[in-house]
Image (spheres, rainbow, N blue to C red):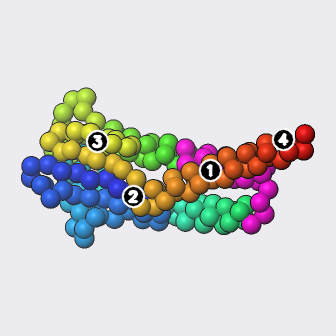
């Protein structure tokens, strides 16, 4: 769904983290361990997929969204389409807010007692979308393939609404 990439002079090839529908993993076999090792220096919690409850129910949410979208397409009712699109938008917004809160927690709630590097007032929250400099690391956070496909599905839903509205107006005009 999402990808976070860190680059720095000591990591010119970069370190990556892929957030999938049901897990978080490194872009390479060692990236997540390296990121967690670096995070230890600033007192950040370990990124452990087993401790992220959203990853347990996200496959069900996405599956329900896909299944309901197929039902909406098969039924072809305007009000159901509107309801589905509103639900999709709501889930997308809630998901982004939850992801931002997760990033905020990891980047701000640091364990100062175990931190080797302490910079007063510094937080290490990567951007939700875009690029941000964190000490000597440049963090880039962007949607992955799944996030892009979800956006495309939403846009197709909006396109369906536009078609339905145009057809409805054309039918009213021809009836008049």
Tag 2 and tag 3, C-beta contact below 8 Å:
no
Residue 164 is left or right of residue 60, and the answer is right
Distance between mark 2 and mark 3 Cα atoms: 15 Å
Residue labelled with disc 3: 131
Numbered disc 1: secondary structure: helix
Give the image location of residue 59, x and y in percent.
Answer: 55, 65
Q: Main secondary structure of the magenta part?
A: helix
Residue 85 is left or right of residue 141, and the answer is right
Tag 3 and tag 4, C-beta contact below 8 Å:
no
For the view shown, which residue lies furthest in the left direction? 10
Is 49 located above or below residue 44 in the figure? below
Residue 35 is left or right of residue 90, and the answer is left
- The residue under the point 21% across, 44% down is 138
| Mark 3 or 1, closer to the camera | 1
Does the image show residue 35? yes
Q: Which of 98 and 78 is in front in this view?
A: 78
Give the quadrant of the N terminus. bottom left
Distance between mark 1 and mark 2 Cα atoms: 23 Å
Give the image location of residue 94, x and y in percent.
Answer: 56, 45
Residue labelled with disc 4: 173
Residue labelled with disc 2: 144
Pick whichever of labels 2 and 4 is earlier in the sequence: 2
For the view shown, which residue lies furthest in the bottom direction? 29
Magenta region, residue range: 74-93
Residue labelled with disc 1: 159
Does the image show residue 87? no
| Mark 3 or 4, closer to the camera | 4
- The residue under the point 23% across, 63% down is 31
Is 137 located above or below residue 52 in the figure? above
Distance between mark 3 and mark 1 Cα atoms: 30 Å
Q: Which of 163 and 154 is in front in this view?
A: 163
């Amino acid at each position: 769904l999402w990808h976070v990439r860190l680059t720095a002079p000591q990591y010119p090839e970069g370190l990556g983290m892929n957030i999938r529908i049901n897990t978080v993993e490194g872009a390479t076999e060692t990236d997540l361990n390296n990121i967690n090792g670096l995070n230890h220096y600033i007192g950040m919690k370990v990124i452990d997929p087993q401790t992220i409850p959203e990853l347990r129910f996200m496959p069900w949410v996405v599956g329900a969204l896909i299944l309901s979208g197929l039902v909406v397409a098969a039924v072809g009712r305007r009000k159901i389409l509107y309801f589905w699109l509103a639900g999709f938008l709501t889930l997308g917004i809630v998901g982004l807010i939850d992801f931002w809160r997760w990033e905020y927690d990891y980047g701000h709630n640091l364990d100062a007692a175990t931190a080797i590097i302490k910079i007063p007032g510094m937080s290490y929250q990567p951007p939700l979308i875009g690029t941000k400099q964190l000490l000597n690391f440049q963090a880039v956070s962007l949607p992955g393939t799944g996030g892009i496909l979800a956006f495309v599905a939403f846009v197709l839903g909006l396109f369906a609404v536009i078609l339905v509205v145009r057809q409805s107006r054309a039918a009213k005009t021809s009836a008049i």
